[in-house]
Every structure is written in structure tokens, then in C-alpha cells.
Amino acid sequence: MQLPLFPLSSIVLPGGIMKLRLFERRYIDMVTNCFRTETGFGICLIKDGNETGAPSLPYPLGTRVSIVDFDQGDDGLLHITTQGEVEFELLTYAADKNQLLIGEVSELPAQASVPMSPEIEQLASKLELILTYVEPEISFAQKRLDDADWVCHRLLELLPLAPQAKYELLQLKSNHERLEALSAFKIEIGQGS
């Protein structure tokens, strides 16, 4: 499957929401084409480079997203809201004539659901607090804090980890392994000083 790619310094995973403000012509054209063809695009974490300018080198994992809302912001830019659909492995990619990366991807199979456990319930409590800090910028119609997979994905999206650390967690083969790694972190959330 071919997907246009949007390398970013943050990630979105299945069920996640990411808002984007677009000003580069290649991405505005990409979104226009996505509307016309009723398709989505891929968001990958940047391995080397920047979000703007020359195409960045992406890590070889990402998420196919769909566009769920759009408008022109007060700043005159195109604002879109995307929702994460399916994780994928990036097999190859190349820049087109507009410097938009087009990737050949293989969607990863859905994982078996992870049951809740006391350790995951602790992570869910921390996520609930984190979500109060990011709202209303990032808000969910339904907070599925009793769903271990949902908790795993939102923590991976929201924790302020270096790109290499996020990629290492994304490389783990299951959400169970990812949650075990997250449980080993000392996640401290303060009320400010």
C-alpha cells in the first residue's frame, strides 16, 4: 500500500487524535488529494531533519490517519484534525516532485487486547491526570481508561520522551510489552511549583 507521509516530532496511534496546522504547499496538496480520493496519510516520527523544509528522514514505523475535521483557522492556515487508524511498517519511501514523501507501507495486524492489571490501573490514573493538562487542546469524546491498549497508546503519544525513546517503545511487538516498559518508568506528575 502506498501512502503520503507526514514526518513529525510527535506521534499518533490508533484511536488517537492529532491536530495539525498546515502551511506548506506539499501538505495542503496532500490533504486536498486525501479528500478527493477519500484516503488518509501516514504520520511517522522524524529520525533526522525538521518538520518544515527539506524532506526529513522518518523512522520506519508509523500510523495511517484519517482526517475527521478541518477548517481555516484565525491565522489563515488550514487546520485539520486527524485520527489514528492502523500502525504500519514503512518499507521504502521517496520524495515526489513536490518534496512530499510517498511510502510503501505494510499495515501491522491488530494486536490481541491486553487485560487490565493493577500496574496498568496505576498508569491509567497517571494518564487521567495528564489528560487534564492537555485539554481542551487534545480531548477525547470518550476516555477509555479501563482499556489497557487505549491507555498504552495515549501514554506513548503524550509522554515527553525523546524521539529515539518513543521509537524504541514503538518497536516492541505488543502493547503488553510496551505497557511493561512504561510501568518501569518513573512517571511523576506534579501540580506545578
Image (tube, rainbow, N blue to C red):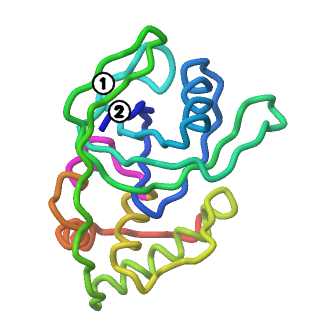
Q: Residue at x 37, y 48 (%)?
A: 63
Q: Which residues are magenta?
A: 159-169
In-front residue for pair 33/160: 33
Q: Is residue 141 left or right of residue 5?
A: right
Q: Residue at x 61, y 38 (%)?
A: 35
For the point 36% across and 59% down, which residue is it? 156
Residue pushed farthest top? 97
Please say whether residue 66 is one of the residues in the magenta stretch: no
In the rendered image, residue 186, in percent from the top left (x then y), is placed at 30, 69
Please, is residue 54 above or below residue 159 in the view? above
Q: Quadrant of residue 136?
A: bottom right
Main SS of the magenta part reads helix
> In the image, is residue 162 part of the stretch drawn in magenta?
yes
- The residue located at (38%, 64%) in the rendering is 153
| Percent of width and height locating residue 77 | 74, 30
- Circle 1 is placed at which residue position? 57
Q: What's the amino acid at mark 1?
A: Leu
Q: Pointer 1: residues within 10 angstroms few (<14), some, or many (20+)?
A: some
Residue where numbered disc 2 is placed: 46
* Quarter placement of the C terminus: bottom right
Q: Determine the CA span between mark 1 and mark 2.
A: 6 Å
Q: Quadrant of residue 172?
A: bottom left
